[in-house]
Image (tube, rainbow, N blue to C red):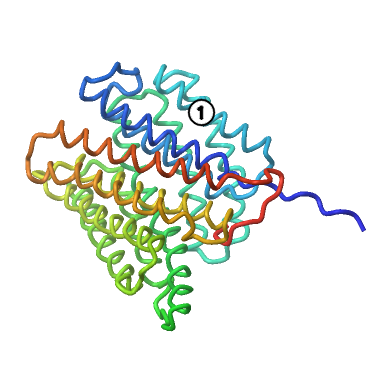
Amino acid sequence: MQPRSPRLPFANAWFFPAAALYAAFLLPWSVLTLLGLVPALPGLATSVGHAHEMLFGFALAVVAGYLLGPQPLRFTLTLLGCWALARMSFLLWPGSWLALGSAAAFAVGLAWRVLPRFLGAAKKWRNQTVAPVVAGLGLLSAVASSGFGEAVDRLMLSQTLLLLATLMFFMGGRIIAPAIAGYAQSQGWRLDSRVQPHIEGAVLILLGLALLLNLLSWPLARQLAGAIMITAGVLTSIRLLRWQPWRCARPDLLILLLGYAWLAFGLLLFGLGTLLPWLPLSAMLHALSVGALGSLTFAVMARTRLIYRFRDAGAQAWAQPAALLISLAALARVLPALLDRPRPAWLLLAAGCWSLAFLALTLLLWRCRDAHPDSSRGSPEH
């Protein structure tokens, strides 16, 4: 009998620490740059550069780590190298051919490994939506690295945030629903509303329509897009409430639910900011980009590696409260804009809270590092 070949290591063992470190150091650095407190890298000289690295640097690394699953180590390190080169070239030479080429190489490599899994294996259309979302994220990352101008960059970033909201809605629901159902069973009660396919399908369609309308410059199209996003936020809130979050007492589940609440709130603010000119839309978007994206990526990275390493999402409980710092950072970006208060001190508070949260996550990921790099015990969420 021939011995079994060793299982492939998960890509998240490399991408998650890289994403956490990047979030902990570079994104706060960009805030300090905007305040004139540190030297400015060319790619971070404007708020557009800050948003670019938030979405295409940090968020895409998390997406890659989570969706790639087990991969040959050589491929994982090559793709991680493309991501790192794309980050360095955008920071130092934004709009250069090197920035475009490395971003495109990373996008192609990610799509090559992820798209067939969802287009070929998935039978329901809702499950197949991951494929066009990932393809869209890769395409937008390349376009936004091409230096077409600030107007195009802002449109690409807005579209990217909607695509990430779609992915957070879908993948977050697929993680939260079974996790709460299992918790409910262990506590002696039953969760009847789990995936909620009708709500899931409706929100996916609404967000797809919002993506299309957001491309149009007509006033009516913008108003329709705003109304659609508000509707999507309301339906996301209903889905969240039907999971009965008040009955959950486990910190790891509460962090996931908090991130999903930020997603619902962020969609509402995005829609309202699109409809109401007096609301500062750029500030409203931080509910999605900091609150939802930050909280959900923190929770998913921690949960995935804890289950892989310890078979227990509640292990290393000291790290869970650090996720609350992300919500504080989001509030420090959204509330001052709503209250029309001076912002520099609030920006520093948000940057500090964000950085501390992801430094704690980096330490957690280090403690969850593989004891045997050539083996893979798998994760129930892959």
Q: Nearer the viewer, residue 100 or 307?
A: 307
Q: Is residue 151 above or below residue 200?
A: above
Camera-nearest residue between 249 and 223: 249
Quadrant including the N terminus: bottom right
Q: Height in image: 89 above or below 143? A: above
Residue 374, compared with residue 204, is above or below; it is above
* Residue 181 in which image quadrant: bottom left
The amino acid sitting under disc 1 is Ala
Which percent across, then down, holds residue 362? 45, 40
Is 229 displayed left or right of 204 in the figure? left
Q: Badge 1 local density, few (<14 within 10 Å), some, or many (20+)? A: some
Residue at figure coordinates x 62%, y 34% from the top left: 77
Residue at left 40%, top 50%?
319
Asked which quadrant contains residue 238, the reply is bottom left
Tell me where residue 242 sits by quadrant: bottom left
Q: Which residue is mark 1?
A: 84
